Image (cartoon, helix red, strand yellow):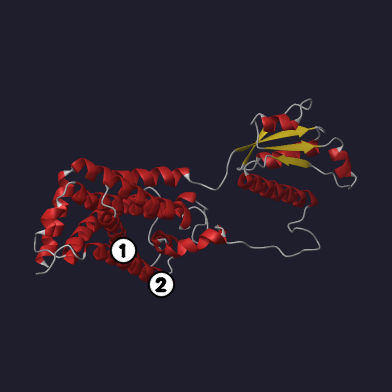
Amino acid sequence: MRRIVAQTRKELTQIVRDWRTLLLSLVLPLVLLILLGNAISLSVTDLPLVVQDLDDSTASRELIDAFRASLTLRVVSWPTNKQPSEALTTNRARAALIIPAHFEHDITRGDNSPVQIIVDASDANTARLISGYAGQILRAHNRLMSGSSIESPESPVEPAIRLWYNPGRSSKKFYGPGIFVLGLSIFPPLLAALGMAKEEDQKTILQVYVSSIGAFEFLLGKVLAFMAVALAECLGMLLLLVTYFGLSFSGDPTPFIVATILYAFCVASFGTMIGATIPNQAAAMQAVALGGFLLVFLLSGLIFPIENIPPSLRWISNFVWGRYYIEIVRDAFLQGGGWPAVWFQVLIVGVIGNIFFSLAWLSRRRMQVKP
């Protein structure tokens, strides 16, 4: 035990001595959390919509006002002597609303008056959202004109929708916990991998070979040191989640606390394993970027649901440690399910961390040859 504590103290001393690297490792996660937490958003607002009113009547202006009241669409006037397609090709708008002539006359007579909506579908997700919002606006306008509060006489069921956990549909509250996990998945294992690979590059590992410390004690001392760095980063980002993102614990915080300690062990063990098996700092950095960033960013459910990933790649997400921790963090800050909801994810994080540590130990178990 004393050798483990001595190894941990030695690693922490080296980390603190390089204060620039330590400062960057503590500040960069905060910068990452602020930038990505504000930049990533799947909700759209202020999309330009050109309107070509060929009727210029009271009814057509009321319809235009219905679109103008939307927070998603921004109405832009368009001359009647120009084709609406020009607005799409010149990127002046993402959609076009064309109101035909005799629009008010047809409505007054009780006839249908089709309104054409042209959507730029080069971005399929935005096109789908514009189509959905435009359909909702038109249905609401039709109900208002008919004086009815339901969809139609044939379907008298009116849904009463309640949004739970994130009623304001804030993207920051959804992506904030995910970026929090991403920061913990990148920087602590990167420092651990570089610190371990540096032992080989600078040949200081030879001093360990001739010492009395065992492979288990050597590796555990390193892992504990970088766990301390990970937990320090966690405290800084946690403070930012509470103050800047407006999040708070929704239920029992003990699953989050236990999972955070286990995840710090997991990512520190991952970096130590990479540095032990790849004794080159440049190659170790690339390996951490692949596992700590790319897999967690794309295959953990951070950006989009795992169910949307193609089946040929979805199975990989079962081995991505960040996936389980993201579910735990989101449950702690949004849903509040507690242990009954996330006990399995906490267990998986601990198991994966032990696998990483065991692989690192297997690569170093013959450090000393017993006489």
Q: Can residue 252 be seen in this view?
A: no
Q: Mark 2 points at which residue?
A: 344
Residue reaching furthest to the bottom: 340
Type of amino acid at the residue the image marks with label 1: Phe
Does residue 34 sit above or below 257 in this rendering? Answer: above
Q: Quadrant of the C terminus?
A: bottom left
Q: Is residue 329 left or right of residue 142?
A: left
Type of amino acid at the residue the image marks with label 2: Phe
Dot in front, 1 or 2? 1
Q: Where is residue 243 in the image (x, y as percent from the top left)?
A: 35, 50
Q: Where is residue 234 in the image (x, y as percent from the top left)?
A: 30, 54
Q: What residue is rendered at 22% in x and 45% in y?
A: 22
Q: Position of residue 128 (x, y in %)?
A: 65, 48
Q: What element carries label 2?
A: helix
Q: Name the residue under label 1.
A: 356
Instruction: Bin the neighbour count of mark 1 within 10 Å (Cα to Cα): few under 14, some 14-19, many 20 and up.
Output: many
Marks 1 and 2, the one that precedes in the sequence: 2
Q: Nearer the viewer, residue 182 or 337?
A: 182
Q: What residue is rendered at 46% in x and 43% in y?
A: 39
Q: Position of residue 67 (x, y in %)?
A: 69, 41
Q: Is residue 146 left or right of residue 249?
A: right
Residue reaching furthest to the front: 371
Q: Is residue 49 visible?
A: yes
